[in-house]
Amino acid sequence: MIRAGAIATAIALAACAGRGAIPTAPGALAPSSIGDMSPLALKTCATDPPQWEWIFKGPCDAFTLKPTGGTFALGTYDDISLKGSIGYNSLKGSATIDLADAIDKNGDIESYKGKKFPAYKAKGTTVLYVVADNQTSETIKPKSHPGKPVLQYSITDSKGFPGKTCAAAILGKAGWTAFPGSFPVKGHTVTVTQYAAPSGLELPPKGYGLYFAFNCY
């Protein structure tokens, strides 16, 4: 979590600029390089839009997705940083995707229409949630391509993960569905890679989020 002292400093700086609050719009606070992220450099997008449904208050990255894919990187939050890629897809042009994460503690996921975010309960400990928000009216479907993953997340926890193995799941209308396979922790990093699209893996049009969960054991 962002330390209390860092929050107080950020509020003071914002007040001096005449805003009186920490800016949350995309790009309001420019991040430094991945793995060298200070709390004051944390970039968030905890508003509607660009997020839809449940609002995640952790770090955010707005990146461009093309038919051949795109990459993303999020700042450090609760000692966890994330980067990865989305592979080949059904886009005809390009799309802006806003990606944010949260740990579902201390109110960092807002309720949606009075409904709390559905926690993922699986083996071990759920360490991170991620939401991808498509800013176009087009449903984006993954396409298999030889040697290229349709989705890849690389998660680093400087404290170390609660276990030697991690897994992932996706939230659909029927609830959470686990990705096939499990993924070994190497040092302080685990990489989740999918070469075939798991059930439910598509980016819905604007107005709906695509939610992921990661658990370790």
Image (cartoon, rainbow, N blue to C red):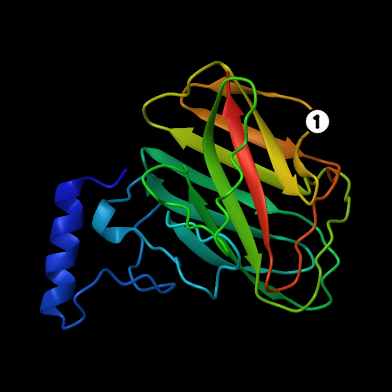
* Residue at 55%, 73% in the rendered image: 50
* Residue at 56%, 61% in the rendered image: 112
* Residue at 59%, 29% in the rendered image: 215
- Report the amino acid beneath label 1: Pro
In this image, 135 relative to 4: left or right? right
Q: How many numbered marks have been drawn onto this rendered protein structure?
A: 1
The N terminus: image quadrant: top left
* Closer-to-camera residue (139/106): 106
* Residue at 84%, 76% in the rendered image: 92
* Closer-to-camera residue (12/115): 115
In this image, 61 relative to 142: left or right? left
In this image, 58 relative to 86: left or right? left
- Res. 113 image quadrant: bottom right
In this image, 92 relative to 155: left or right? right
* Closer-to-camera residue (32/13): 13
Residue farthest front in this picture = 114
Answer few, some or many: residues within 10 Å of disc 1's Cα (few below 14, many 20 plus, some between 14 and 19).
some
In this picture, is 193 found above or below 107? Answer: above
* Closer-to-camera residue (56/135): 56
Q: Position of residue 117 (x, y in %)?
A: 57, 49
Residue farthest bottom in this picture = 18
In this picture, is 214 found above or below 82? Answer: above
Q: Position of residue 114 (x, y in %)?
A: 54, 60
Q: Position of residue 2 (x, y in %)?
A: 28, 47
The C terminus: image quadrant: top right
Q: Position of residue 65 (x, y in %)?
A: 68, 67
In this picture, is 192 found above or below 57? Answer: above
Q: Secondary structure at mark 1?
A: loop
Residue at label 1?
180
